[in-house]
Amino acid sequence: MARDLTQLEILTELEQFAGAALDRHLSMVKEWHPHDYVPWDAGHNFAMLGGIDWDPSQSRLSDVAKAALITNLLTEDNLPSYHREISANFSRDGAWGSWVGRWTAEEARHSIVLRDYLVVTRAVDPVALENDRMAHMSHGFAAPMERTDTSGDGGFLFSVAYVSFQELATRISHRNTAAVCDDPVADRMLQRIAADENLHMIFYRGMCAAALDLVPDQAIEAIDLIVRNFRMPGTGMPNFRRNGVLMAKHGIYDLRQHSEEVLQPVIRQWNVFERDDFGPRGEQARERLAAFLDDLEHVRIPRFEEQRDRALAREARRGVGTVAG
Ligand SMILES: [Fe+2]
Ligand SMILES: [Fe+2]
């Protein structure tokens, strides 16, 4: 049986694909500038410069919209951690290095524009937001691949599988956040960010597809582990549970969306269940993955939806208006 390729061998073999995908990405990205998306004339000074400080009555957003925007922003804020993961697991040379630099620079726009919007419109408490940012960034981001990869080699495959799903997950989250903001300015900004996340997903999904062709067994083992251990990148941030539950309950990011709009389309694109190039190890990983997806669809999602519907009905009876609030 052929031996596994090392991480360096995989990166070297795939560099031509990375170069072509980077060129394609650069031909598709639309240049945009965060300042264009912020309603500056809605802004006022805070107390230190003679104005008034934030007060909850100044916010026009619902609790759900606030929770989603804060979660999305703190997630974007943690870019230094993601950059560290990606640059450690990819390479700083050639097309890989160029991609890591370009991707990092594009990602940085997302937190810039989200923060400017939230502070200028006084949508959320800027002091709490800053305290949460400090806590979240100080803690950093623990990638699922760090917890699952014990070999010390193969971090690239775990990383590239994770970001293929994660970029699509953040796209869905930004897009659905736009729908609950009820503000055309927020809608335009979030659609703009979501379009970036989609192009990022396309790059990573393409790299993972090339890895599946090159090292099918190694790649499907990484994909299977990542899917079964998937955590949103914001896991661990202040109030993540409370805000995550609120977002799931109100359709911004829930288990069915995770399965049907994130996992399934990417797995389908890779032809995971139609391929015939797996060896015994790959077959085993594919069977584990199939069993996991089946359990998600037939057990976990219906259970979540039942609980959610009961909770929403309870809130409606109590007259809790979380969406309109
Ligand atoms: Fe982003
Ligand atoms: Fe992204």
Image (spheres, helix red, strand yellow):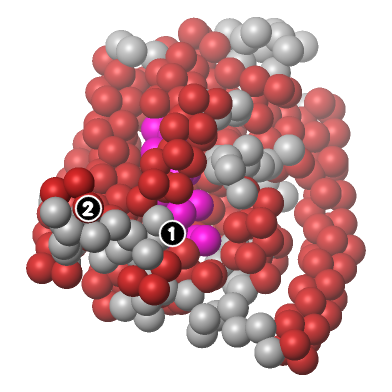
Q: Amino acid at mark 1?
A: Leu
Between label 2 and label 1, give the one nearer the viewer: 2
Q: State which quadrant residue 15 falls in.
A: top left
> Dot 2 lies on which element?
helix
Q: Residue at x 33, y 60 (%)?
A: 54
Q: Which mark is residue 69?
A: 1
Q: Residue at x 65, y 20 (%)?
A: 146
The CB of the residue at mark 2 lies under 8 Å from ligand 1:
no
- Which range is magenta? 67-79
Position of residue 208 measured from the top left corner of the image (x, y, whole percent): 52, 35
Q: State which quadrant residue 42 falls in.
A: bottom left
Magenta segment main secondary structure:
helix
31 left or right of 171 in image: left
Position of residue 300 measured from the top left corner of the image (x, y, whole percent): 84, 61
Question: Looking at the picture, does residue 144 appear above or below residue 288?
Answer: above
Is residue 207 something one can see in this rendering? no
Is residue 59 something one can see in this rendering? yes
Front residue of 298 and 169: 169
Q: Residue at x 45, y 39 (%)?
A: 131
Q: Check if residue 74 falls in the magenta segment.
A: yes
Separation of marks 2 and 1 at Cα, in angstroms: 24 Å
59 left or right of 291 in image: left
Q: Which mark is residue 47?
A: 2
Which badge, 2 or 1, is on the more N-terminal residue? 2
> Dot 1 lies on which element?
helix
